[in-house]
Amino acid sequence: MPMPASGPVFSIPESIVCLLFIALVPLAAAGLALINTGLGRLRSAAHSMMASLCVFSVAVLVYFLWGQSLQGFAGEPARIAILGGKSWSWLANGSLFFRHLPLGGSPASLAALLGMITVGVVALIPLGSGADRWRLYSACLSTVLLAGIAFPIFAHWAWGGGWLAQLGAHYGLGRGFIDAGGSGAIAALGGLAALSIAWILGPRQGKYSLDGMPTAIPGHNAIFVLFGCILALLGWWGLNSAGALLYLAVPFGRVVLVIVNTTLSAAAAALTAAIITSVRFGRPDASLTSNGWIGGLVASSAGCAFVAPLGSLAIGIIAGALVALSVEWIELRLSIDDPGGSISAFGIAGIWGVLAVAIFAHIPAGSMAPGETAPIQSDQWLAQFIGIATLIGFVLPLVYGLNWLLNRFVPQRVAPEGERQGLDLYELGAGAYPETVTHGDEYTRGG
Amino acid sequence: MKLLGFLLLLAGWAIVLAAIVLLPAAAVRGAFVLAGIAVEVLGLGLFIRAHLLSPGELR
């Protein structure tokens, strides 16, 4: 079985440091769960947190059962096709259930651990767009498809020594597709899944009037949302640092740059979103500012190890503007009901993050990528464009098609009565705030 | 329209892959990759139009 380019080599202290960064990543999941819950309705709050826990668990189990065997790691056996005289690594050829994976602190074992947690983060992203109307069991089944098929395939291509990662070695396209912290493999993939779910479920009852104008359905807890943003920052520090170390083999000292870039991008994006909403609506909007913050984190991920701090600032400003403007555009022009803003904050900001590498990243000329034997050449931009083309032209049809098929057999949307009653009472039998009176349908016409 | 958009998305990606495999000259390869992305954007546009809500679907 041909081997793709090899991964990094760590000393024991380096493995421990990497493990500490990976330990931060669950905070990203906690942050996203709080944000999704806070931006949803009060009467579905417990359901949202319950769904977050369940889809995270499903994703972790699926990844353990077979996902990791499809994603693999650079240097491990893979399924290779020869196209045009070059080897294309399409899928890893690992063992199921982490068998034959030495869980002793090797980079491959650390990558498996990171993958197991990040797939849980990916699974949380579509929950934001399906809030208040996505059945719990359907969300779990959809997660099986996302974590068991879509994520491992793209993660292998981008991180596991797959053909996207090898574009530099085989075709001289820069260093190959660069996506250190997962702007593409985590955020854009999750954002495209969120778009698919929003399309398949349709808008919430009462979201659009008969003339197509959207009604504002505000989130129920801004404190959850804003605290979730702080937790997400810590999670993204871990995600970007561990990703850069494991998938791009950057020197350990560059982690400081990664953390500075991540923080700068988030701060710039949040302030940009706050300023834009202040100008447009007369006062800053907490929900859009938090979406901007997440968009900044997401956009920083791909190039966090190769961008100068000023570049990260620019990436964050553009991400914040894109998110703040696209949320309204998606709701108003495309009639897509995305309560958590996942399509903008993850899908659009993620694709921008991948593209930003082509614009802002500085990759030392003549340096070697890990496992490669030829000096890095130019055309990094083309590798990033090919990654974006793969996300839109392959990942979107894949996740949409899988969820469409699932919806044919297991309806994903809750019954109208459940939506009117609230998912807490309808699916869980109890609300998140039992001493609080939940109103019937104050935002819907004729409710 | 939805199916056509779906197929155009895949066709655009196929053009991108074919450009990488078949075209060794950097400029031509880049041009065909961009052309593939343009086809994808067209497919995405159709896909979005197919999902726009009709008045009967608005609640």
Image (tube, rainbow, N blue to C red):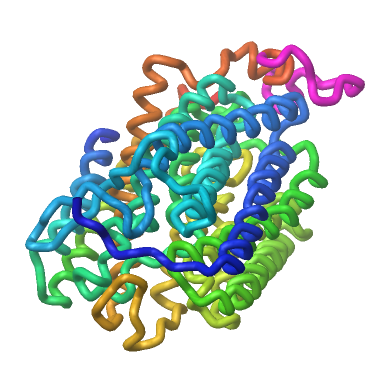
Residue at image point 55% right, 62% down: A242
Tell me the quarter of the image containing the C terminus of chain B: top right
Relative height, residue A248 to residue A437 (above, below): below
Relative height, residue A76 to residue A116 (above, below): below
Image position, residue A190 (x, y; %): 48, 45
- Frontmost residue, A99 versus A226: A99
Image position, residue A239 (x, y; %): 58, 58
Q: Main secondary structure of the magenta part?
A: loop
Is residue A99 in the magenta section? no
Q: Quadrant of residue A377?
A: bottom left
Image position, residue A350 (x, y; %): 49, 57
- Frontmost residue, A91 versus A387: A91
Residue A178, visible in the rendered structure: yes
Relative height, residue A185 to residue A412 (above, below): below
Which region is colored magenta?
Answer: A427-447
Q: Quadrant of residue A196?
A: top left
Residue at image point 32% right, 40% down: A397
Residue at image point 34% right, 45% down: A153
**Left/right of residue A103 with respect to residue A275 in the rendered view:** left
Residue ranking furthest to the right: A435
Q: Quadrant of residue A193?
A: top left
Residue at image point 54% right, 32% down: A211
Is residue A429 in the magenta section? yes
